[in-house]
Amino acid sequence: MKDAIVSPEEKVIILDFGSQYTQLIARSIRELKVYAEIVPYNQSLETIRRESPGGIILSGGPSSIYEKDSPQVSGEIFDLGVPVLGICYGLYSITDIFKGKMQASQQKEYGRAVINIKSRTGLFKDLKSKETVWMSHGDKVVVPPEGFRVTASSKNADIAAIENSKTKIYGVQFHPEVYHTENGKKILKNFLFNICGFKGKWSMKSFVAQSIEAIKNEVGSGTVLLGLSGGVDSSVAAVLLQRAIGDRLYPVFVNNGVLRKNEAEIVIRRFKETLNLNLVYVDASDRFLKKLKGVEDPETKRKIIGREFIKVFINESKKIGRFDFLAQGTLYPDVIESVSTKGPSDTIKSHHNRVPEVLKLIKSGKVIEPLKELFKDEVRALGKELGMSDGLIHRHPFPGPGLAIRIIGEVTGERLQILQEADDILVSEIKNAGLYNKLWQIFAVFLPVRSVGVMGDKRTYENVIAIRGVTSVDAMTADWAYLPEAVLRHISGRIINEVKGVNRVVYDISSKPPSTIEWE
Ligand code: XMP
């Protein structure tokens, strides 16, 4: 496979049948310090054999085994002599191949369920006789295949788990990779360490070595273009790529005129001087600001910035000359709604790394996304492993359209300056209070609402700054952050006293949903 990682000592191959949880299996296994790689369910036996995995997992999937053209695993997988664990659809595949019997269940089971464990050995070693698990299925096994015994049952399924300990083939109806399966980690641990015999030696260090080798193999003597935003993801991708191909990486940083205070200078210094990257800096701020003149509608602002960015980026790439690959710092949650870009169900969500212009570039060149199997916290761990500073790897996310979507209404030079100053005070005070790393994001928003104030003996009639601070795990949901009163008081005092044009500061106490994190 294009982005296959070269053979580490201990590896699990996950055959993907398209479950929304497939990446969670990989992540859980990586957390247990074993390397996991996802391949399509119909990956050739030849390739799998070459990868010499020490364990194979058959993922769940949205299909019913009864559907015409439902995905079928090759029976030869089981001749490799490698332990196999089938999860949900994976269990049905095992049952189908070894001639057990299944039926569509009258009672579909979704959500939490309790299983009764009949045999607390093998996969279920050290578990209780009753365990809470996460079920999500319609079909069920009614007769176990020959040579298999039933190891657990649930209210709606007499056969919730099976095993053939001689051939080391196991199947479970439920999802051990999902957080709600209380002892799911223990089950995976039993599979990896007791059944496959792994030692758990994999680490981010190995990931770095494997990725560098994979990038080198793929790029050869070619050149790579990367859009660098200065945020965590593209920065980590840049450093990783630089390790692999050095100066043949061209990170392009576009100043779109709606960056935070001193952001351009900080990024240039950091990447050129500290990280020694071959940075290409393009100051296109005038061009962006001109296009944004008079525009109030949030969607129009977003579209203008997105379109201009692509134009500038393509322009710049032409100046550099022919490049062979485009690299992006896409993370797994960015493609999460595609379900699986490698498996059978491949509907891609329109994320900013997947807009039509980029897709066109993807088609014409080749695209490298070295972080696309990772979650944010894993990318931060990777950044640390690469020796990047804490300040950089713990930066809060910053949207592509920048401060333009934090200025309600038209973006003007004056508003931009007010917001940059207020935001700078806010973030530096939050850092001083030791709160920055506890928050998912905190930023200022410019509200073009005038309200009356009094400063000295004078009446003022100025703008409002709103503070938005949230805690979150993945930005899909978020809670407004409860900040100490003294910190808020200090921030508000500084903004009103130091930023000309602001006489009122408010704190946003809305959670997501129903509010979004950004205001526009
Ligand atoms: P919302 O406002 O949708 O934001 O709750 C969720 C997360 O996504 C970030 N965000 C963006 N990031 N381009 C980006 O790269 C964008 O257009 C964009 N819009 C929102 C936002 O900052 C938050 O972390």
Image (tube, rainbow, N blue to C red):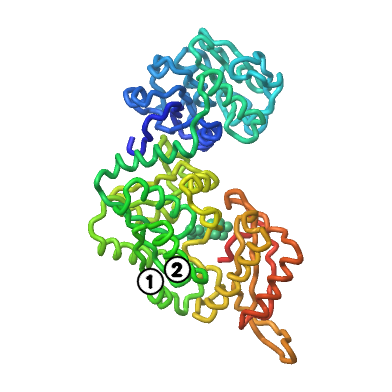
Which comes before the other along the chain, label 1 or label 2? Answer: 2
Q: Which mark is residue 422?
A: none
Crowding at dot 2, Cα within 10 Å, few <14 / some 14-19 / many 20+, comes out as many
**Tag count in the figure?**
2
Which secondary structure lies at badge 1? Answer: strand
Picture quadrant of residue 186: top right
Residue 249 locus on image (x, y percent): 32, 53
Q: Residue at x 65, y 23 (%)?
A: 156
Is the C-beta separation of discs 1 and 2 under 8 Å?
yes
Quarter of the picture containing the N terminus is: top left
Crowding at dot 1, Cα within 10 Å, few <14 / some 14-19 / many 20+, comes out as some
Disc 2 target residue: 264
Quarter of the picture containing the C terminus is: bottom right
Q: Could you tell whether 213 is left or right of 475 in the image?
A: left
Q: Could you tell whether 328 is left or right of 467 in the image?
A: left
Q: Amino acid at mark 2?
A: Ala
Q: Is mark 1 within 8 Å of ligand 1?
A: no
Q: Nearer the viewer, residue 342 or 421?
A: 421
Res 133 seen here:
yes
Residue 267 locus on image (x, y percent): 45, 64
Q: Amino acid at mark 1?
A: Asp
Picture quadrant of residue 273: bottom left
Res 336 seen here:
no
Residue 54 locus on image (x, y percent): 45, 22
Which secondary structure lies at badge 2? Answer: helix
Picture quadrant of residue 287: bottom left
Q: Is mark 2 within 8 Å of ligand 1?
A: no
Residue extending farthest right? 485
Q: Residue at x 45, y 68 (%)?
A: 264
Disc 1 target residue: 283
Q: Residue at x 63, y 20 (%)?
A: 157
CA–CA distance in space, label 1 to label 2: 9 Å
